[in-house]
Amino acid sequence: MIERLHTAWQKHRALVRAWLMLVGVIGVFLLLQPLLLAIGFVRWANESTAQLLALALTLLGNPSTASGTLVRSELFSLEIIFECTAILPIVLFAAAVAATPTAKRAKLWALGWGLPAIVLFNLIRLVSLVYIGRLAPQAFETVHLLIWQPLTILFALALWLLWLERRKTS
């Protein structure tokens, strides 16, 4: 019995370590949330996201302003909360990258292109929600909660899988 456990451990050690790293990074982030709130990181993330959204809407021909976390547009106004930012999918992606047994340089490369991709995806999500809020307000909550939130998580995981696949072929 002990030998079977030892054999199983030897066979799956890298996978177990990767899962422990993934859970550990996410756990540390969750434990740090009160500190992030206290030092103003959450406010900064919310306000930065609001400003980025207002800029994107303005560049798309819809003059918009951000005041704190509130984005005002002729189309639709909304308030940015922490869950609207790209931080949570970034943490998921970064944790998955950190958990992958590979060289640090490869991990830095993944973060270098993955984080901006997640921020851009999140911005596309928010812009689309403004248009949905204007054109189909009855669908706003459904699209916001049931479509975009799972898609955002899937996008972060898909980026990680894409990185893994490209790593294998290079």
Image (tube, helix red, strand yellow):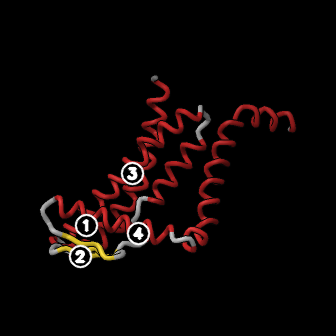
Q: Position of residue 5 (x, y in %)?
A: 81, 38
* Residue at (45% x, 36% y) in the render: 163
Q: Earlier in the sequence, mark 1 or mark 3?
A: 1
Is the C-beta separation of discs 3 and 4 under 8 Å? no
Mark 3: which amino acid? Ile
CA separation in Å, label 1 and label 2: 8 Å
Q: Nearer the viewer, residue 170 or 137?
A: 170
Is the C-beta separation of discs 1 and 2 under 8 Å? yes
Q: Earlier in the sequence, mark 3 or mark 2?
A: 2
* Residue identifier under label 4: 46
In this rendering, which labeled residue sits more in front, label 3 or label 4? Answer: 4
* Residue identifier under label 3: 118
Q: Is residue 125 above or below residue 142?
A: above
Is the C-beta separation of discs 2 and 4 under 8 Å? no
CA separation in Å, label 4 and label 1: 12 Å
In this rendering, which labeled residue sits more in front, label 1 or label 3? Answer: 1
Q: Secondary structure at mark 3?
A: helix
* Residue at (47% x, 53% y) in the render: 90
Q: Nearer the viewer, residue 118 or 15?
A: 118
Name which quarter of the figure residue 123 lies in.
bottom left
Q: Secondary structure at mark 2?
A: strand
* Residue at (36% x, 74% y) in the render: 69
* Residue at (41% x, 72% y) in the render: 81
* Residue identifier under label 2: 72
Mark 4: which amino acid? Asn
Mark 2: which amino acid? Arg
CA separation in Å, label 3 and label 4: 15 Å
Q: Residues within 10 Å of mark 3 (few under 14, many from 20)?
A: many
Q: Position of residue 129 (x, y in %)?
A: 26, 66
